[in-house]
Image (cartoon, rainbow, N blue to C red):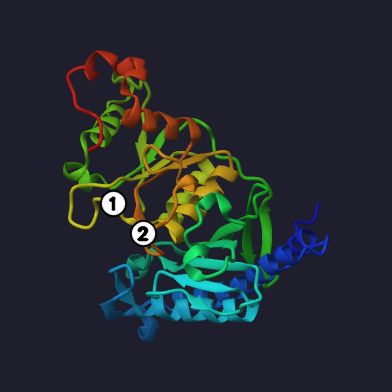
């Protein structure tokens, strides 16, 4: 059977002439074209000195900007203008940009997630969330993630791929250089419900709360511990790369809050990192929380609000939540819980 192109897939999506669906499709098409241009710049690597260096200043969230961050943001903002969306909120901009007052949709985007990995040739990406446009930017970007109309990310790795959901499952399209377009590679991705891999930055162990340390200790104990199975650890330090791996082969990702300055509320951004990833994962049968609460139920208070993030195999995410909220329900650990303080402050 011939595999569908992204364009053919979007044509099917808009077959009933729904104007909102038409705008979503036009935005995805415009972003796909921008992603191809971003990839060309990334592929220059150290040779693309104009885009690979550090600008020496910080973005709206306080992170150091690379030249390529700003270049990518400019390309996606231009694509948003061509698609005629209502508002464009970006990690690289302090405030949302108003574009088209007649549009029914808006976009929140991380134009180049993982840009600290540019120099080390690790996969990076672009994450975006498409939401209903409301009466103004403030109300548009204070909706919970459950209101998203679509979400996705491009990953610039050995393959350039688009992971996309329009709330009807999660699909993966891989860019074909031969055809010059994205082609559907996985029509229905399902995250395995059980996990034998976890992704977390172990160098922060001393900064975590006791709940997170205990969960990781139990995983590391393997067959001899209360989990009675061996776990592998993976940590790419690129959100899109870790997400792609979990979509393909399962596992769980943890980026908890910790005691370091600036990390007490978590580190990842809620509206343009956590909520689109959460929707993609849930649409693939997984789960995503801030450790205890479903990510898609959180109401943003600020465009650049941060959050802890746990996502992946549903049963493992649920187990992590029990470590936080109901440790006595974890029968294999019950004798120890009476002597250890596990609840978050």
Q: Which residue is mark 2?
A: 305
In this view, the residue farthest toward the top is 335
In this view, the residue farthest toward the right is 16
In the image, 186 versus 152, the foreground residue is 152
Against 336, residue 14 (above or below) is below
Q: For the C terminus, give its image quadrant.
A: top left
Percent of width and height locating residue 37: 54, 78
Residue under the image location 24 percent in, 50 percent down: 264
Q: Quadrant of residue 254?
A: top left
In the image, 330 versus 46, the foreground residue is 330
Residue under the image location 30 percent in, 45 percent down: 256
The secondary element bearing badge 1 is classed as: loop
Against 328, residue 183 (above or below) is below
Q: Quadrant of residue 95?
A: bottom left
Against 143, residue 340 (above or below) is above
Q: Are marks 2 and 1 in contact (CB under 8 Å)?
A: yes
The secondary element bearing badge 2 is classed as: loop
**What label does residue 66 carry, if any?**
none
**What label does residue 265 carry, if any?**
1
Percent of width and height locating residue 115: 37, 68
Percent of width and height locating residue 28: 63, 67
Say if residue 155 shows up in the picture: no
In this view, the residue farthest toward the front is 135
Say if residue 28 shows up in the picture: yes
The alpha-carbon separation of the residues under discs 2 and 1 comes to: 9 Å
Q: Earlier in the sequence, mark 2 or mark 1?
A: 1
């Amino acid at each position: 059977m011939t595999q569908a192109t992204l364009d053919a897939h979007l044509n099917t999506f808009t077959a009933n002439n729904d104007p909102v669906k038409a705008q979503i499709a036009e935005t995805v098409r415009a972003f796909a074209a921008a992603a191809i241009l971003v990839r060309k710049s990334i592929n220059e690597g150290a040779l693309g000195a104009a885009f690979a260096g550090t600008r020496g200043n910080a973005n709206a969230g306080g992170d150091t900007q690379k030249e390529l961050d700003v270049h990518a943001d400019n390309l996606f903002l231009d694509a948003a203008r061509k698609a005629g969306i209502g508002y464009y909120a970006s990690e690289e901009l302090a405030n949302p940009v108003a574009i088209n007052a007649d549009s029914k949709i808006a976009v929140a985007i991380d134009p180049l997630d993982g840009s600290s990995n540019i120099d080390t040739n690790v996969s990076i990406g672009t994450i975006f969330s498409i939401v209903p446009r409301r009466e103004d930017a403030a109300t548009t970007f204070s909706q919970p993630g459950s209101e998203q109309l679509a979400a996705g990310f491009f990953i610039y790795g050995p393959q350039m791929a688009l992971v996309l959901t329009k709330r009807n499952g999660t699909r993966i399209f891989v860019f074909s250089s031969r055809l010059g377009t994205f082609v559907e590679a996985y029509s229905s991705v399902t995250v395995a419900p059980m996990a034998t891999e976890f992704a977390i930055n172990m160098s922060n162990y001393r900064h975590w709360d006791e709940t997170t340390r205990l969960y990781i200790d139990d995983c590391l104990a393997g067959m001899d511990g209360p989990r009675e199975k061996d776990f592998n650890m993976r940590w790419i330090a690129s959100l899109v790369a870790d997400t792609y791996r979990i979509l393909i082969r399962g596992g769980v990702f943890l980026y908890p809050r910790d005691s370091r300055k600036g990390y007490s509320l978590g580190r990842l951004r809620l509206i343009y990192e956590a909520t689109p990833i959460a929707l993609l994962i849930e649409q693939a049968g997984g789960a995503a929380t801030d450790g205890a609460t479903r990510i898609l139920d959180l109401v943003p208070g600020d465009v650049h609000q941060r959050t802890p993030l746990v996502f992946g195999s549903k049963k493992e995410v649920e187990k992590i939540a029990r470590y936080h909220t109901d440790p006595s329900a974890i029968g294999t650990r019950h004798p120890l819980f009476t002597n250890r303080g596990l609840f978050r402050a």
